[in-house]
Amino acid sequence: MCRGKSIIVVISSAPRRMADILVNSTQSVLRDTYDYYLWTLSLSDNRTKGWPLVDSPVPTFFYTLAYLFIVWIGPKIMKNRRPFKLTWLLVPYNLAMAGLNAYIAVRLLTASFRLRYSYICEPCRQRYDADELQIADAVWWYYFSKLLEFCDTFFFILRKKDEQLTFLHVYHHSTMFSFWWIGIKWVPSGSTFLPAMVNSGIHVLMYTYYGLSVFGPPVTKYLWWKKYLTIMQLIQFTCALILGVNGIRTGCEFPLWMHYVLIVYMISFIILFGNFYMKAYIAKGSKCMEVRYGQCLDDEESIANRKLKYN
């Protein structure tokens, strides 16, 4: 009988020991993760410490979650409401974004030219001369512009253009903001300047296009050059992919893991934007004038569908 009781006690205590092991393991993983995070902070760039939104990942994480929540709840709130036109707001917004991106591109171009930066591989040095700080400042503005670009999505929701809330659109906007927090936190200069400079230059043309397209078909019929912006973006992603591969191959003095992240990220963009180009311009042909994120918005079929939806 005593032996039987001991077996029962051992069996009944087994789940408790498993729970203790699980709790201890979880605490150990969390502790190691936090210690790793503290270690990475010791490697962050001192020049951007204390800059808005930079010191902690919490604001970037919070804004990204809030953005995704609005993407989910916004169309539900607007479902039984009439769409807002917002022409009075969209024109100055898009032109202001074009101006901001022009400012970023010019600041990066002039400082990198004076520093004789390499377009192939430029290590990130924590130097405090004026041109290096100018690059870091421009990269911060580029990172902040990705937060402002959340408004693109909010305007789509308010205008009830749900067809523009594609996976590509949401993926692009939500991830760019997060990835560029990593950039401004750890590598605000060096090779980081190139993708920010090129992308800002393209965004000058894109936001100019979006500002003009607000006026509808009377204006969009003259904006035939939109599809070439997508081609430029695909070229940009391909070049960034090649630079990432070359950085690994040549041992470029830049964080190795960032090269791998860049390669995977650019492949995803090439696939998604390539699919966008196929749908927007090859499948729809030249009839499609206003296009955003894989959707043709002003061909006869799309216009008829929208009229049925809102009437």
Image (cartoon, grey):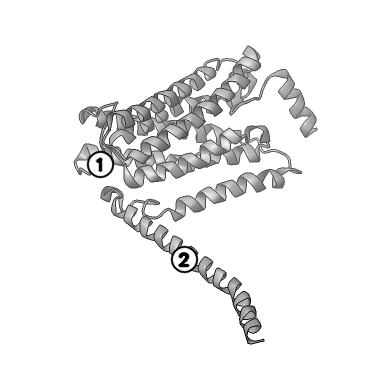
Quarter of the image where the C terminus is located: top right
Residue sitting farthest toward the bottom: 2
The image position of residue 153, as x and y in percent, is 58, 39
Q: Which residue is mark 2?
A: 27
Q: Is residue 92 visible?
A: yes
Query: What residue sits 61% from the left and 26% below the top?
Result: 294
The image position of residue 70, as x and y in percent, is 61, 47
Which label was assigned to residue 86?
none
The image position of residue 23, as x and y in percent, is 52, 68
- Residue type highlighted by circle 2: Gln
Q: Secondary structure at mark 2?
A: helix
Which label was assigned to residue 133?
1
In primary-sequence order, the first of circles 2 and 1 is 2
The residue mark sitting in front, 2 or 1, is 2
Q: CA distance from mark 2 to mark 1?
A: 40 Å
Q: Taking 305 as reference, is 246 left or right?
A: left
- The part of the image, by quadrant, that contains residue 282 is top right
Q: How many marks?
A: 2
Residue sitting farthest toward the top: 286
Estimate how packed mark 2 is, as few (under 14), some (14 to 19) or many (20 or more) residues with alpha carbons within 10 Å. few
Q: Taking 162 as reference, is 21 left or right?
A: left
Most foreground residue, 250 or 258: 250
- Residue type highlighted by circle 1: Leu
Query: What residue sits 49% from the left and 19% below the top?
Result: 231
Quarter of the image where the N terminus is located: bottom right
Q: Is residue 281 above or below residue 266?
A: above
Q: Secondary structure at mark 1?
A: helix
- The part of the image, by quadrant, that contains residue 117 is top left
